[in-house]
Structures are given as structure tokens and as C-alpha cells.
Image (cartoon, rainbow, N blue to C red):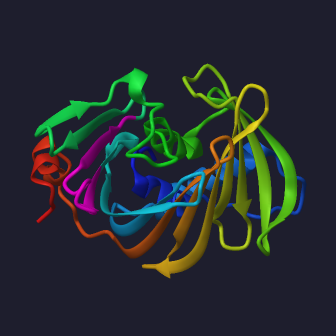
Amino acid sequence: MNGTNLASIATLAVLIALSGSSRAETARELLDQAKAVNEAREPKDLRQRMKMLLVDSRGTPRTREIEVFSKNGAEDETKSITFFLSPADVKGVGFLAWAHHDREDDQWLYLPALKRVRRITSTARRQSFQGSDFSYADLELFDEIPDWTDEDAAATLVSPHQDVDGTDTATIELVPRGKDVEYARIVVWLARGDSTLRRIELYDADRSLVKRLKLADFRTVAGIPTPHRLEMVNEKKGTRTILELSGVTYNQGLGDDVFTERSLVRGRVD
């Protein structure tokens, strides 16, 4: 599974699972089990409507309304498109991403004020995604993590059981190997009871916490436990980005024509 979009972040929690064992488990075994379950129940496509709340270091909020479409294709290829619906200063802004299994994702941004599509370059991927605490690289990273192998990251089981808001989780540390990732260490918490991801922490080379993603308000949609609230906290800047889902549908039969620059410019999906 790959994908560079807000939908991939919101559904990352439902695409990872753990299975129990009577003996001691290793981090790699847990991740391999997760990947197998992920592939078995991954939806073909999804459509999500959500509110994005941006909170600055002074606690001042700004609200965005967005809609996200995503489709999984062959060979772990994923396409997604995001539209900003409101307020007026961002209405019509669009983001298109084609995720690839064996190379860097393709990303495009449409700015209606300029009336042109801009390709997101490698040097720009660490910039903020439309003023949020997610960078363009973060959107790609969160979708890649479940597919990482030992060649991509060293995995260590930090704790086989840890409580996260009343949920029993396994804590796994990932250290990227030879990948262009701005974080030196990534820690994930995987729930054992309902097979969902509950938290991700991102650390820099000094082992200082940079960002923390929390997933909550899980509801079952079409048999898939889906988080309806996600909060990304930037520990260094003191800012937060909260995503609240108001509508989620899976397996609607979205066509490839949805995920094109033409749709990006039109600003809608029929």
C-alpha cells in the first residue's frame, strides 16, 4: 500500500493489524502480520469529507473544509486527490498524488489564484502542506511505513504491551535505512484488540520528539474500523492540526479519470 494524501493518513490506522501469539513476538513478525492483514482488507477506493483545524502557537484556530478521494491500483500503486472546499481564501486549491512502489511519488498542487498546476519537487516536500503540521513528505511517509521491510528500516519491539488511552498496544521503533526521511527514529503504537494504529511519534537525529500523531474516535464503516479524529502536534513549534471526518465511504468504484490534472483544475469529482 502506498499513497500520498490525507486519506492515507486517516486510513493508515485501519490498514494495520496484529495477531496474537503464545510466544514472544519480534517487531518484524508483528509488522509482517500487519502487512498480511492489510492486504486482505484494504479497500479498493475511498471518499472522505473532513474538517481541518489549524491551531497556532497562541491557540488561535483556523478551519478548512476538504474532500479526499483515493484509489489503490496494481503493484501497490495508489492515486489520490484532495480538494479544499472552504474558506474562500483556499477554495479550489487541489492536491494530486500518484504513489509508486519503487520510486518517489509524483505530487502536484493546483492554486486557483495562479490558474496553474505546480509540480511538488523533491526540495519542496518538507514544506508545510497548506499551512498544516503535515509536510508533503509526511503524507508520503505515513503511507509507506506499513510496507517497509528490514532493508528499509531496522525494527525493534520496545514494549509488547502498553496502554494508550485504555487500549492495549505493542510499541515498535523504526530506524530508517538508506531512505530520504527527515526523521531519524519513528515509534508506532499498534492496538492488539481492534487491530488499529493509535499513535506515531517522529524524532530527529538528536532523539528529540518533533511531531506526534494521535488517532481516535474509531467507528466501523463497511466493516472497517475507521478513526474519525486525528491530531498532529508539532512539539517544536507548539502548533496543532486536527482532522475530523464527517463522512467516509469505501469501494465506490472510482475511475482513474478522477485522479488527473484535469480533475485537479476542475476542482470537483462528478
Q: Is residue 216 left or right of residue 99?
A: right
Q: Please state if 141 lies on the left or on the right of 114 as rendered.
A: right
Magenta region, mostly helix, strand or loop?
strand
On the image, the x and y values in percent for residue 148 come to 59, 37
Q: Is residue 113 magenta?
A: no
Residue depicted at 67% across the width and 31% down the height: 153
Residue with the most extreme right position: 23
Q: Point out residue 129 in the picture as x, y percentages from the top left corner.
A: 41, 43
The answer to whether 185 is drawn above or below residue 69 in the figure is: above
Front in this rendered view, residue 121 or 73:
121
Residue displayed at 73% across by 42% down: 28
Is 96 part of what is drawn in magenta?
Answer: yes
Q: Specify start and end residues of the magenta stretch as a single range.
A: 81-100
Q: Classify residue 265 as left or right of residue 204.
A: left
Q: Name the image quarter holding the C terminus.
A: bottom left
User: Residue 251 is drawn in which quadrant?
Assistant: bottom left
Q: Residue at x 43, y 38 (%)?
A: 136
Which residue is drawn at the image coordinates 9% and 53% (left, top)? 266
In the displayed structure, does residue 11 sit left or right of residue 216? left
Residue 252 rendering spot, x and y as whole percentages: 26, 70
210 versus 72 height, above or below? above
- Report how many numbered discs are placed on residues in the image: 0
